[in-house]
Amino acid sequence: MNDALRRLVQIVVGLYVFGAGLAFTVIGGFGQGAWTVFHEGISDHTTLTIGGATVLTGTVVFIVVLVMKVPVGRGTILNVLLIGPSTDLTLWLIDSPDHWVGRAAFTISGPLVVALGSSLYLGVHWGPGPRDGLMLGLNERGVSIRSGRFGVEATAFTAGFLLGGTIGWGTVWSLVAIGPAVQWMLPWFDRAPGTTTTNR
């Protein structure tokens, strides 16, 4: 298998795993990350599924990123196209457990699965996701990455909350867990340009 094909397989698997992790937080029902709260809120008030709302939001943000002239790549497009359907497929395959222990297990594992998917995806170096591209665009216009991310995610979270998206301790767990987990996992899958190994 040549390197380009390995990267394609890695990014497709990563984006599927990412979407599955988002679905796990929905299945758990104890709260999810800011964007999923927003997508769930949109789903509650439209005919869109959560995955459909994810694709729609990603498409809108992608257009904004293009207007801001932020460099994108194949990974950016795949991100928009694959995460939403993966989320919907996982929600279709797995019912929410009746007992709170099972739902808590999904809530706890969800952000870790998202981190695994993120690490697989980011390790390919095929372009930022549309939401990360938005942060970069704001940064080029004088807004710090930290402030830009906080502002955009706070807006998504607030809108999702007002639309009835599920928040709770799982929301806090998502915020706390994903970043450190990605930092830990990413070196396992990092395929910096010119390399052919997935582990370091």
Image (spheres, grey):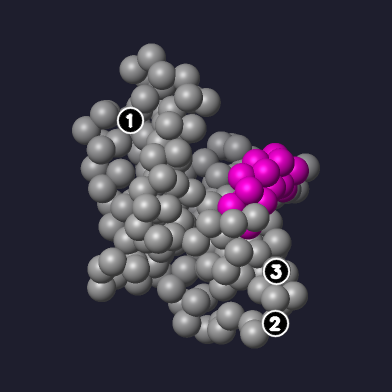
Element class at badge 3: helix
Badge 3: few (under 14), some or many (20 or more) residues near its Cα, within 10 Å? many
Specify the principal SS of the magenta part: helix
Q: Measuring 56% from the left and 37% from the top, which residue is drawn there?
A: 193
Instruction: Indicate yes or no whether the magenta region holds residue 184.
Output: yes
Q: Tell me: residue 93, above or below residue 117.
A: below
Instruction: Indicate yes or no whether the magenta region holds residue 177.
Output: yes
Element class at badge 1: loop
Task: Name the amino acid type tagged 1.
Answer: Val
In magenta, the rendered stretch is 170-186
Q: Measuring 37% from the left and 19% from the top, which residue is drawn there?
A: 140
Q: Between marks 1 and 3, how big is the CA–CA gap?
A: 39 Å
Q: Tell which circle, 3 or 2, labels the residue nearer the N-terminal end.
A: 2
Q: Measuring 37% from the left and 25% from the top, which residue is drawn there?
A: 138
| Residue nearer the viewer, 137 or 103 | 103
Query: Disc 3 marks which residue?
Result: 104
Task: Name the amino acid type tagged 2.
Answer: His
Q: Tell which circle, 1 or 2, labels the residue nearer the N-terminal end.
A: 1
Residue 66, visible in the rendered structure: yes
Front tag of 1 and 3? 3
Query: Disc 1 marks which residue?
Result: 70
| Residue nearer the viewer, 9 or 195 | 9
Element class at badge 2: loop
Query: Disc 2 marks which residue?
Result: 99
Task: Name the amino acid type tagged 3.
Answer: Ala
Left or right of 32 in this view: 70: left
Residue 70 lies, in percent from the top left, at 33, 30
Mark 2 and mark 3 in contact (Cβ < 8 Å)? no
